[in-house]
Image (cartoon, coloured by chain):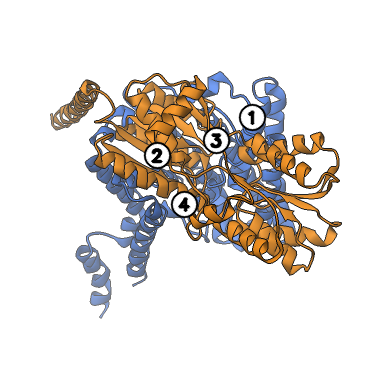
Amino acid sequence: MQGRGKLIGIIAVIVIAVAAVFGYLQFQKSQEGAAGKKIALSNNYAGNSWRQSMLKSWDKVTKKAVADGVVAEATAFTTSENQVTEQAAQIQNLILQGYDAIVLNAASPDALNGAVKEACDAGIVVVSFDGIVTEPCAWRIAVDFAKMGEVQLDYLNEKMPNGGNLLEIRGLAGVFVDDEIHKGIEAGVKKYSQFKVVGSVHGDWTQTVAQKAVAGVLPSLPEVAAVVTQGGDGYGAAQAFKAASRPTPLIIMGNRQDELAWWKEQKDASGYETMSVSIAPGVSTLAFWVAQQILDGKEVPKDMIVPFLRIDQANLESSLANTEQGGVANVEYTLEDAQKVIAAAK
Amino acid sequence: MTDTTLATPARDRMAFLGDPRLLRKALPAVSLVAILIAIFVLNERAMSYRGLDLMLKYAVPIAFATIAQMFILTVNDLDLSIGAFVGLVACIAGTWLVDQPVLCILILAGCIASYAAIGALIHMRRLPSIVVTLGMSFVWLGIAVILMPTPGGMVPDWLKALMSWKPPLVPFPIIACLVIALVAHVLLMESSYGAVLRGAGGNATAIDRAGWSLLRIRMSMYALAGFFGVLSGLSLIGLTTSPDAHIADRYTLLSIAGVILGGGEFVGGRVSPIGAVIGAVTLVLTGSFLIFMRISPDWQIGAQGAVLIVVLALRALIKLREAK
């Protein structure tokens, strides 16, 4: 008798829970537009200056949007160590938490597809950016990373028509972004045959790692004319060359504040010339506005491209002045910018 | 005099609400229930078939990896390569399982055999397992990256279907975890050879004198770990629908934490398969709990560690009393 009573109790609890879920979903559906909607940012990594700036931009722009009543909520969630499994579990939890949209910087283009599909099936809008996902139901704000590698060689071709030896600093092995930029650099080297890659190290997009890696390989290298990079590694490379008392080559920078500050110093001292290219971390805010537009019922194409943020000799000073200590040169996007990017993709 | 010495333990038991040994055994289950209640209070939607299914999905591969780690811990070794190994299995399965299933199974069997060989190497050369397995972790990761320089690959539909199976009444992850725990329990705790295996961690000399081959014991423990590592990798890609060399890097530490959280010890062959699975599930739920708490990203990592420390501190407290 007692056992049956318990069973009925449990069933009652489950029924009430299910009813609550249905009621809540109905309530959400009844609200028009994006104003009552909740957006979550699922971010896979926060351990470098680029990601820190990305989170700061998100915070700044979404706080204002929430205060203005554009959306109801926009919370950021980060996993600790760039792990697919953790992020997949995080997405599952965000589905359960009842978000209307998940803005996603993914740890892997494919390995999160299971979780993303699950979110789509639950009626959640998924907008991936920077680290995009291939699951067809998600939106993608992609960076043309291969192009980012190629423009470095275009610049070098202009600067050094006679060519020379290149040292390539790559990112984190096995990560899609690293592979794409590397492909772009390879394509560039093929296009301008006067350049030759004499060494390649993994700098993991971190100055200290890059410095150690470059210092390790330098003794075995011939004269290096230029260093092609992926961002977050240029300053470390410069320090390694200095420590080995070798002449400083032309190092392509990646918009980090320490890199720009070093460049400025060299420019003032000896007229050093280079260029710097990366993606503005504020791209998270672009993704936010795109998600907001989708929730608002606008028609948005599934694939969009983000513009690069390139710094040249001429605009170095102004860019450096606008970049905070330890940060990355940045742009925060507005609703109008997002609408432009959407229109361009149509 | 004799009266008082006999009476003291009994009175202690009364005073402390039960035997500290029992309390220690119950601690993993108590932590699991505590975190479940906390989650249900924070998010009522979690308290449903779908909620439990979503939250516990990723507990299945972690439970496999934790059991793998437990086998190694049973013989007083530590496996720092299990995460990389699971990643390699994922890449191997993603490359060949669809097109050449027979070849794929042979390769995976080869992986298990190499795990046994590592056990033999560690035993015969008396090498520290931490160093050998740390080295092997780079080997596994290296092969995985060569095999799959960029994420991609194919996962067979039956594997995906199995991992997203929705049986009536009880969510699949719960059934899977129960089965894993029971199989490992029977294997290690109920069988007679299981007692010998555990004995090798507790008192190797005694087992050796009794005529058992310690080499064979270590090799079979490593092979079992390899086998469960393979199961972990397969179940993982069934969930993610696509492999990636770095897919399970975190499993190394998670699996160790799972075993310890589940009442296992680093030395002495003191492990508990059921506890280990409970530990793995608790770790996964901790992640859900922190997300439902909306802890700021800066604190999430630290908070996860804090939960671990609280449970381990409780255990240390219980142990202290046990010693008295």
Q: Earlier in the sequence, mark 4 or mark 3?
A: 4
Q: Given the image, what chain letter belongs to the residue carrying mark 1?
A: B
- Is residue B265 visible in this depiction of the protein? yes
Counting from the top left corner in percent of width and height, residue B110 is at: 72, 36
Q: Residue A144 placed where, x, y %?
A: 61, 33
Looking at the rendered image, the quarter that the N terminus of chain A falls into is top left
Give the Cα separation between the discs numbered 3 and 1.
Answer: 37 Å
| Same chain shared by disc 4 and disc 3 | yes
Colour assigned to chain B in the rendering is: blue
When asked about the image quadrant of residue B87, the answer is top right
Callout 2–callout 3 Cβ contact below 8 Å: no
**Residue position marked by numbered label 2 in the rendering:** A41
Badge 2 or badge 4: first in the primary sequence? 2
> Mark 4: which amino acid?
Gln
Badge 3 crowding class, 10 Å Cα cut-off, few under 14, some 14 to 19, many 20 or more, is: some
Q: Distance between the residues labelled 4 and 1?
A: 36 Å
Query: What chain is tagged by disc 2?
Result: A
Secondary element type, mark 3? loop
Mark seen at residue A52: 4
Q: The orange chain is which one?
A: A
Mark 3, mark 1: which one is toward the viewer?
Answer: 3
Q: Name the residue tied to disc 1.
A: B93
Disc number lying in front (4 or 1): 4
Residue A52 vs residue A39: left or right? right
The spot of residue A3 in percent (x, y) is 17, 31
**SS for dot 2:** strand
Q: Name the residue under label 3.
A: A307
